């Protein structure tokens, strides 16, 4: 940890270093000894007083020493007063005293989501005893011995074993069950995670097997104390007093650290499911029956045991005799006709059939504070915005076109991961792009064909270090692109349909027919089990993480993993991701048929349906370069059907085929329809017009409720740096000064801004001594470097006649800024305004076009004073339009003889632009559908620099402001004199 060991590169000592230096003195004495004597010249020291990590205990110890010493001379400094003010030395957080008191963090339990099944109940802790027991029986009930489920005695033994182990291999469980020769649906070396809490409390040093004979109420009391006590000493005392436990036993319990995460289910749902799991039902059926138990509430207790058995038998028979949605229909009939459930009871059911209950469908998605709160409970912030927009759009579509019959959806990977994971994903994408460009250059230099297969082969060849991971043979570069070396899927194509680079490697062609339908584990265990250990070691070496391939170890884990052959079609048509399921349940409240699928196979359909020419080639490498790609993806997703996947399974592109099979398209003219609709999309961009946001918060002080009004700015007012306004010597010119670290300087232009001429000349001399400028670029490490021990040393010094040279670390530079504002009237502090809020285009009294720029700072000032945000100066005669970031304009239509409102969407989309940047007579527009910000070529990018009719003139492009509604229709945004436009009194 850097806090304890320090950061040598920044010469920042850690806590451990300071503790060792303090020794028998105090922190204050030690730091005072580091200060130079007053009046002496500068001498270089290895340590500084500042820039170090310190602990709270150091200050607390020092204050105790001072207090104890001063107590000899002041009778008022009593022990009781000391405890109140600075606490005790070995105090827990409740006895820290007023000075060192740390307020407990605000509870975040309100962020815990609701149960997936009991919508009004909060999720329980993952270490909850009932939930852990439910997991034990869930595991036990799905075990199969010789093709059949375990009997009742074996199930209870399996669940008991699960609860007495934290982790165990299945082989150990097999010996426990005394079934050495039986065949189970688990491999012997598979590791199963047991129940930590039950296993710990049933340890021989705590309760032993007696733990399972303790009453449930007594267990719950003990668990709650473990969960809520935050002081281990107090917990130990309480256990000894209230539970009559021995000191050693209580100490062991107090040291238990519970898992603080939350389960997906509530305690009530877990208890209901456990009831049926104990009767031997598999988890899916137990969930359905638990929903029936929940819906009946207290009346369930009055049902005779034979009637309970009848309900279980009936639903099991329905499940066996009906498949898929037929089971849902049959179950609905049984619940409504025979069990006579009311609509209120129906709402309490949980299980797969709830989505089929058309009686519960709402006409529209609810818009209310409670509905907003439910969406805000979603963990991923980006997902919240998407769901709010989706709700708004779907409600509008229902109002416009009527009820929706079916929705097919897929969630972007960005919505399933957090911000940090998205950041890592972007970094990995940039790395892959860089590698791909490098490999293309190398293949071009070797005169090889730049085909996708050759690029893939070369990338895999570099990753596996020029060696076949199956045979261990060296792969020469001259053989790589021949038929002697093949690309293979690690997990077979027909079982995974996974075409990612993570699932590919190279193999000698002689093995291709033997491994094409097998994982490496299966192949070697069937053909050469004695070589498997060596293969694993070789794979670990070949697929080790390197600078070029930092995630290669993931491929090693995939290479040695046993692949559980699953129903690939079910997985692709029904996304098992938890967030996808939440979105599906939300959509099913209004739409009767909803499918949320995993969208990663859409790239396969793009290839098979020959859709590579819809966009520019770069868009298929980076989907975010064109905003319409999301609609393109959705169109493909809407046309995917199960039978297409069945055909895909048979088309492994890396295996030779005897004859070419044409992949079917959804319908005739599919490509033409897709192309037409896609290029008729009018892309709109979010524009938040709010400048200030107001929030009212109720605060209770001394039982008196007060409502506080909180006003916050919707954006940053200015850049972080603060400047001082200075007048240049021997000149009337004024400029803004700021201190900057010299290590941040990268160009000659920055050095020339240095205020002090002596310092500037020293810096220039240092650069020249360091091989000089590279053009205008300062060489790396010209001003500082690191020693072999990792310590930083400086190279730029001010001369010192009577002492050591003084290192120059920061210098003052001069900036000539225009858009600035003074922070406070009595302080010489100025800031560089960050951005412009809007530009008003108007005609003056001579009929000429003019601009009036308003910064965000000025807009906020107007909003605070309740003034109109949009204002024209005194010379304004005719308002033309306003420009804000993300405003939409139609540009480049010269012939206006025909009404523009009659033009088609496909025509308008070619001329629809958004405002990208605004500055003084420099307006940048980008095609609304384009997101390639590096592309500065027309027609994607247009710049207007003047109000004339030349190349970059306003009159040349004739901007027409428009608005686009949620359904994609556009209207002219022509309000000649908006209500908020007034003449400025400036």
Image: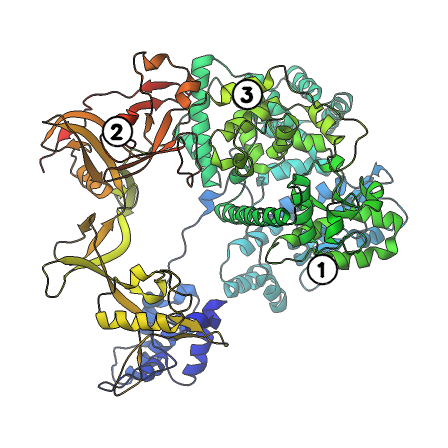
Which image quarter is the C terminus in? top left
Residue found at the far right of this picture: 181
- Residue 366 occupies which quadrant of the picture? top left
Q: Which mark is residue 954?
A: 2
Q: Earlier in the sequence, mark 1 or mark 3?
A: 1
Could you classify mark 2 by the number of other residues whose Cα lies within 10 Å: few (under 14), some (14-19), or many (20 or more)? some
The residues bearing labels 1 and 2 have C-alpha atoms spaced at a distance of 63 Å
Q: Position of residue 909 (x, y in %)?
A: 41, 23
Is 56 rendered above or below residue 920?
below
| Mark 3 residue crowding within 10 angstroms, few (<14) / some (14–19) / many (20+) | some
Q: Count numbered badges in the picture.
A: 3
- Identity of the residue drawn at 59% across and 27% down: 611
Q: Residue at x 49, y 41 (%)?
A: 379
Vertically, is 604 above or below 811? above
According to the picture, the residue beneath numbered tag 1 turns out to be 541
Color theme of the render: rainbow
At mark 3, the secondary structure is helix
Q: Are the residues at dot 2 and dot 3 in contact (C-beta closer than 8 Å)?
A: no
Q: Is residue 362 above or below residue 151?
A: above
Depth order, front residue of 536/74? 536
Q: Earlier in the sequence, mark 2 or mark 3?
A: 3
């Amino acid at each position: 940890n850097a806090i304890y060991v320090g950061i040598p590169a920044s010469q920042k000592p850690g806590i451990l270093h300071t503790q060792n230096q303090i020794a028998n003195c105090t922190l204050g004495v030690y730091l005072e000894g580091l200060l130079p004597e007053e009046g002496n010249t500068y001498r270089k020291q290895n340590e500084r007083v500042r820039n170090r990590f310190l602990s709270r205990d150091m200050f607390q110890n020092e204050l105790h020493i001072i207090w104890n010493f001063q107590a000899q001379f002041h009778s008022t400094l009593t022990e009781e007063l000391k405890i109140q003010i600075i606490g005790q030395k070995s105090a827990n957080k409740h006895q820290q005293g007023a000075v060192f008191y740390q307020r407990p963090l605000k509870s975040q339990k309100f962020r815990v989501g609701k149960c997936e099944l009991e919508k009004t109940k909060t999720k329980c802790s993952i270490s909850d005893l009932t939930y852990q027991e439910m997991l034990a029986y869930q595991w036990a009930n799905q075990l199969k011995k010789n093709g059949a489920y375990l009997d009742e005695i074996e199930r209870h033994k399996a669940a008991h074993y699960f609860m007495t182990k934290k982790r165990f291999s299945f082989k150990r469980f097999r010996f426990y069950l005394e079934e050495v020769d039986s065949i189970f649906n688990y491999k012997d070396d598979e590791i199963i995670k047991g129940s930590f809490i039950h296993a710990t409390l049933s340890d021989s040093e705590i309760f032993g097997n007696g733990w399972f004979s303790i009453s449930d109420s007594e267990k719950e009391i003990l668990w709650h104390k473990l969960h809520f006590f935050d002081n281990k000493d107090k917990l130990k005392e309480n256990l000894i007093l209230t539970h009559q436990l021995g000191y050693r036993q209580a100490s062991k319990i107090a040291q238990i650290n519970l898992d603080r995460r939350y389960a997906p289910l509530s305690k009530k749902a877990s208890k209901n499911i456990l009831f049926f799991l104990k009767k031997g039902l598999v988890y899916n059926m137990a969930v359905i029956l638990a929903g029936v138990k929940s819906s009946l509430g207290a009346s369930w207790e009055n049902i005779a045991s034979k009637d309970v058995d009848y309900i279980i038998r009936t639903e099991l028979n329905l499940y066996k005799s009906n498949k898929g949605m037929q089971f849902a229909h049959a179950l609905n009939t049984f619940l409504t006709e025979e069990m006579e459930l009311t609509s209120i009871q129906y709402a309490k059911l949980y299980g797969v059939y709830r989505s089929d209950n058309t009686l519960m469908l709402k006409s529209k998605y609810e818009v209310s504070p409670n509905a907003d709160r439910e969406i805000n409970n979603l963990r991923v912030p980006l997902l919240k915005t998407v769901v709010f927009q989706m709700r708004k759009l779907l409600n509008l579509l229902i109002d416009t076109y009527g009820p929706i019959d079916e929705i097919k959806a897929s969630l972007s990977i960005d919505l399933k991961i957090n911000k940090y994971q998205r950041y890592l994903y972007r970094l990995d994408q940039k790395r892959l792009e860089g590698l791909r460009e490098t490999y293309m250059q190398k293949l071009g230099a070797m005169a090889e064909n730049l085909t996708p297969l050759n690029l893939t082969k070369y990338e895999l060849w570099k990753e596996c270090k020029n060696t076949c991971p199956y045979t261990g043979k060296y792969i020469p570069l001259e053989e790589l692109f021949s038929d002697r070396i093949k690309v293979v899927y690690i997990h077979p194509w027909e079982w995974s349909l996974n075409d990612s680079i993570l699932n590919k490697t190279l193999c000698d062609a002689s093995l291709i027919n033997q491994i094409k339908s097998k994982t490496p584990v299966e192949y070697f265990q069937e053909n050469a089990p004695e070589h498997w250990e060596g293969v694993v070691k070789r794979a670990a070496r070949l697929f080790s993480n390197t600078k070029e391939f930092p995630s290669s170890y993931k491929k090693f884990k995939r290479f040695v993993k046993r692949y559980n052959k699953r129903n690939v079609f079910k997985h692709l048509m029904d996304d098992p991701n938890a967030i996808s399921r939440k979105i599906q349940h939300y959509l099913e409240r209004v739409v009767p048929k909803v499918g949320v699928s995993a969208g990663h196979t859409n790239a396969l359909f793009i290839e098979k349906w020959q859709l590579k020419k819809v966009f520019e080639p770069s868009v298929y490498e980076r989907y975010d370069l064109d905003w319409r790609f999301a609609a393109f993806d959705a169109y493909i997703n809407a046309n995917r059907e199960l039978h297409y996947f069945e055909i895909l399974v048979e088309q492994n592109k890396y295996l030779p085929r005897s004859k070419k099979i044409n992949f079917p398209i959804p319908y005739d003219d599919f490509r033409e329809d897709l192309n037409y609709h896609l290029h008729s999309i009018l892309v709109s961009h979010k524009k938040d017009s709010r400048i200030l946001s107001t929030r009212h918060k109720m605060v209770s002080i001394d039982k008196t409720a007060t409502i506080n009004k909180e006003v916050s700015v919707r954006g940053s007012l200015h850049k972080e740096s603060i400047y001082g306004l200075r007048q240049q010597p021997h000149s009337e010119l004024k400029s803004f000064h700021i201190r900057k670290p010299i290590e941040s300087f990268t160009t000659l232009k920055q050095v020339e801004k240095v205020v002090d001429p002596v310092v500037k000349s020293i810096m220039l001399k240092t650069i020249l001594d360091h091989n000089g400028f590279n053009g205008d670029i300062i060489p790396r490490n010209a001003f500082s470097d690191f020693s072999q021990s990792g310590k930083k040393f400086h190279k730029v010094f001010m001369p010192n006649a009577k002492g050591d040279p003084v290192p120059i670390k920061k210098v003052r530079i001069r900036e000539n800024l225009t858009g600035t504002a003074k922070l406070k009237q009595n302080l010489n502090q100025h800031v560089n305004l960050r951005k412009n809020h809007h530009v008003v285009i108007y005609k003056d009294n001579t009929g000429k076009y003019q601009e009036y720029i308003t910064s965000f700072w000025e807009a906020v000032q107007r909003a605070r004073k309740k003034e109109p945000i949009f204002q024209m100066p005194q010379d304004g005669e005719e308002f033309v339009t306003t420009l804000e970031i993300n405003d939409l304009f139609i540009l480049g239509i010269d012939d206006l003889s025909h009404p523009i409102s009659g033009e088609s969407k496909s025509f308008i989309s070619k001329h629809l632009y958004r405002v990208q940047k605004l500055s003084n007579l420099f307006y940048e527009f980008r095609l609304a559908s384009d997101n390639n910000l590096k592309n500065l070529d027309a027609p994607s990018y247009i710049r207007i620099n003047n109000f004339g009719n030349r190349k970059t003139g306003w009159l040349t492009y004739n901007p027409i402001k428009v608005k686009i509604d949620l359904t994609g229709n556009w209207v002219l945004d022509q309000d000649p004199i908006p209500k908020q436009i007034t003449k400025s009194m400036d």
